[in-house]
Amino acid sequence: MVEAFVLRWTPFPVSSPIRFTLPESELPTHWYNLAADFPEPPPPPLHPGTKQPVSLEDMLALFPENLVRQEMTTERWVEIPAEVREIYTLWRPTPLLRAVRLERALQTPAHLYYKYEGGSPAGSHKPNTAVPQAFYNRQAGVKRLATETGAGQWGASLALACRLFGLECRVYMVSVSYHQKPYRKLLMQTWGATVSPSPSDQTEFGRRLLQEAPDSPGSLGIAISEAIEDTLKSKSTKYALGSVLNHVCLHQTVIGQEAIRQMEMAGEEPDVVIGCVGGGSNFAGVAFPFLRRKLLEKRKTRVLAVEPTACASLTKGELRYDFGDAAMTTPLMMMHTLGHDFVPPKIHAGGLRYHGMAPLVSHAVKLGLAEAAAYPQTKVFEAAALFARTEGIVPAPEPAHAIRAAVDEALRAKEEGKKRVILFNLCGHGMLDLASYDAYLGGKLSDG
């Protein structure tokens, strides 16, 4: 048991800084687009009817033109609008910390660093893309946004962003998370969003699924279908997505850019960079800027994507074209997938319960630029509890997967007697996920 390491913890004085912060003046001015630097371009999304690459016009039913152009851009750097950067300063730049207490508990020579995104108003990394998406939609004259959410971090973030830019917000929340995580629903409602459990009685697709399976736990694929149906019924509504798509990964790269600068402040270079993956957004945020250096500067950094074994698209899925939603309404994307009709078990990491993977992340794995690993839920919470008891922060179930992998990397370093510098993205806190910790501490948690 990982918890046993705490019993052998012996304090020792810290002789160097453990928290690295950047001034507001060093907030990134541009987002980074990994697609510009791939040695071979990723396959384009296809129109589900013609099977030809989708055009800008094909995407306008769902997204405003300014975001479609970002989705399709091959430019390496995209400027962050001043109004977006101003809102970013509510929580950015975010801190980088060295987990010295966790290192002591593990008695490892490894140095463990984590980039902490839990200080945003929504408690996760998701506002990094929710804010620009709301900004560009308002700029395009959109009045209302419809979206899905799994664990609720994305729904809460978009609800906040819509409030800041004067937009209405409609959220379809995966049913199992709607009931597991009621306070995330209340957070969305506090910021003015309308929230329904998915499958819902608000759409034709949802009503049909409820007739077939009244107790359906739902899935992100189902919730996406409902949000898209909602969007297509209203001329004043556009769709917003919290992960998977290129422009979402783009917006998150402020994380990795800051982390590179902060690791320089720490005087160390990561041997391995780790992020959890469901759709791929937080992993892209921390990893893509490091992959740029791997591609252009021939750095040797390992990059590791960590997923749940209960929904393991990278390690168990197929790399092929598939729909992003259960109702088969999205373009076909080349990605690692478990199948668009896959309904994952009721694991507590609701943000990772998605059948597919971001095409850019899938392409990075295909090219050997990134690795993938999967862990069962009980092992993940074991590491999450250890982190909370040593570092003080209760992590969300999603980034706890990255913590699990980081702990194992540190233990391997101990076995080998080698120093290893490990960086992981702690993309959100778990203060609204305490029901999952109750299940873990009460011995009621299963692996799916």
Image (cartoon, helix red, strand yellow):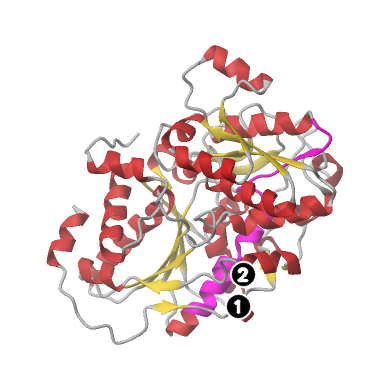
Q: Is residue 167 left or right of residue 406?
A: right
Q: Is residue 126 above or below residue 16?
A: above
**Quadrant, the C terminus:** top left
Q: Secondary structure at mark 2?
A: loop
Q: Is residue 447 visible?
A: yes
Within 10 Å of disc 2 (Cα), the crowding (few <14, some 14-19, many 20+) is some
Within 10 Å of disc 1 (Cα), the crowding (few <14, some 14-19, many 20+) is some
Query: Could you say which quadrant of the image residue 257 lies in?
Result: bottom right
Q: Check disc 2 and give the amino acid type.
A: Thr
Q: Are marks 2 and 1 in contact (CB under 8 Å)?
A: yes
Q: Is residue 7 left or right of residue 194?
A: left
Magenta part of the chain: 234-262
Query: Could you say which quadrant of the image residue 96 lies in?
Result: bottom left
- Which mark identifies residue 89? 2
- Which mark identifies residue 226? none
Q: Is residue 235 magenta?
A: yes
Q: Is residue 280 above or below residue 312?
A: below
**Which residue appears at 60% of the width and 53% of the height?**
363
